Amino acid sequence: MVDAGPVTPGQVSFLLGIIPVFVTWIYAEYLEYKKSSSVPKAHSDSNLVELGEETVKEDDRAVLLEGGLSRSASVKFNSSSIKLNLMRFLTMDDSFLLEHRLTLRVMSELGAILFYFYICDRTNILGYSTKNYNRDLFIFLCLLLVIVSAMTSLRKHSDKSAFSGKSIFYLNRHQTEEWKGWMQVLFLLYHYFAASEIYNAIRMFIAAYVWMTGFGNFSYYYIRKDFSLARFAQMMWRLNFFVAFCCIVLNNDYMLYYICPMHTLFTLMVYGALGIFSKYNEIRSVMAMKILACFLVVILIWEIPGVFYIVWRPLAFLLGYTDPAKPDLPRLHEWHFRSGLDRYIWIIGMIYAYYHPTVEKWMEKLEESDTKRRVSIKAGIVSVALFVGYLWYECIYKLDKVSYNKLHPYTSWIPITVYICLRNFTQQLRNFSLTLFAWLGKITLETYISQFHIWLRSNTPNGQPKWLLSVIPNYPMLNFMLTTAIYVLVSHRLFELTNTLKTVFVPTKDNQRLLHNFLAGAAIFTSLYFISFIIVHIPH
């Protein structure tokens, strides 16, 4: 039974905002068509210009995918005031609409996708079915994807280390994206088939994601020393822009998508740890004190009874969550459970990132040593890693999930370290990656959020996705194929839309314009919400 819940002011404000955007985009497309058809030669020239613009955008996209910043972001909008731009938008000024036609198109597309989310998860237009787990089918699908990926997307990379300039590149970008990709596949299939027997493995995968949050953010801030407001805003946009709209349109709590607040928290903690007294980061004793301070903060908040709720209760409006199936649990229970499981692993990621150059130099010397010494040392490392991994599997992983969760915060670093050792012990393994998994690794945030509504179904606000979206009833495998194809396509498109809008609204080198954009966005949302609140409560 679908329960969409009552219409909320947030949903009405979304409609009041997206309908004018959609109308103005259609009109802008009409203006562009009329302009291009009226002057044939100009049409040809404009095509060349637009092709050039698309080339620039492709370059920007490549930079974004590598974790960099767009070169065209700061020049997307002209320097006229936001008030004037808003007036030109409301009056449907022809030149303004033509200038920003592509931006209006992207915003309209995002609105259409959110509308599709609502149709899939909050209406009876499409059906739903129950989850069924079959171990044979689960393993078959996983191995099939690995085989297909190995046959079609195995690539050798010639990237050089940022530290030594040689082909060592331990824990390189291709490798970490691949890592995220294959973990995400298992994470999603676990949800789709309700594969509860790999629960402990899923906990490990989430810990690895949080480890990469600590590792990646520490590496960026430590090397580039970029603590600018623009960089901070871009990170927050990437983590929270789309999920905020999902919360508004689908009337869900932020904590339903717990990965987003978790990564936001640990990103903020890494940013704070390195940003405070950042000019002393090169001093080893200062860095040791900062890492120790991180441990002490975590111990204070999560280990001492009662402190957690004192610290987070003021933010219960944002981090609180009530599962309709478990209404008696405290509002902060979910946040306490989720954040507590991985409270230490982000710090371990920071430590590994700090010693990354040292490990690379050691690996460089090892690769240059004589064959006998190199082989014996590598064999010893692999043997120790396998033995430690086996002990962890037998003593910890095999525990029931309640017992495992108690040990997880203190032991999750073990399998992560084992994997890193085995994945990097030869130059050949470091040079190769499965690019299909790496591609999936780039869109993990979008696939995580989208799964709730266009692959699975919750059927109610704040509900867990306990059902499957059914487009082809009574044909579970055909339905799986179709819904998965649409789901992955939409997730990839959301990744592109989020990054495109980030380049438009989050300038890289203009803090004043960034502040103006933020204030304008807050003012527009407040106005729409106020109007919507009145509309919703008129009948009462």
Image: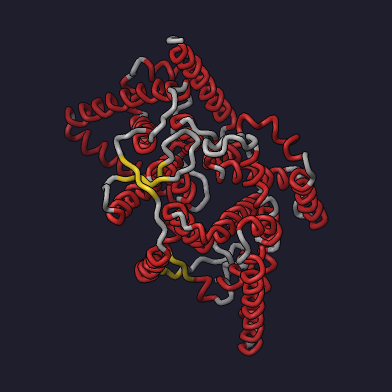
Q: Residue at x 38, y 70 (%)?
A: 147
**In the figure, 384 relative to 447: above or below?**
below
Q: Nearer the viewer, residue 167 or 259?
A: 259
Asked whether residue 194 is in view, the answer is yes
Task: Return the x and y of residue 540 as percentages of the image width and height.
Answer: 46, 10
Determine the image quadrant of residue 312. Answer: top right
Horizontal side of residue 301 vs 175, given as left or right:
right
Horizontal side of residue 291 vs 334, given as left or right:
right
Horizontal side of residue 76 vs 36, given as left or right:
right
Colour scheme employed for the rendering of this structure? secondary structure
How many circles with numbers are drawn on the protein? Answer: 0
Task: Return the x and y of residue 193 as percentages of the image width and height.
Answer: 42, 55
**In the rendered image, which quarter contains the N terminus?**
top left
Task: Return the x and y of residue 265 as percentages of the image width and height.
Answer: 64, 42
Q: Residue at x 66, y 82 (%)?
A: 380
Q: Residue at x 42, y 21 (%)?
A: 12
Determine the image quadrant of residue 170. Answer: bottom right
Determine the image quadrant of residue 23. Answer: top left
Asked whether residue 350 is in view, the answer is no
Task: Return the x and y of residue 532 as percentages of the image width and height.
Answer: 45, 16
Q: Nearer the viewer, residue 445 or 429?
A: 445
Horizontal side of residue 240 vs 39, given as left or right:
right
**In the figure, 55 relative to 154: above or below?**
above
Q: Nearer the viewer, residue 476 or 382?
A: 476
Q: Residue at x 33, y 26 (%)?
A: 22
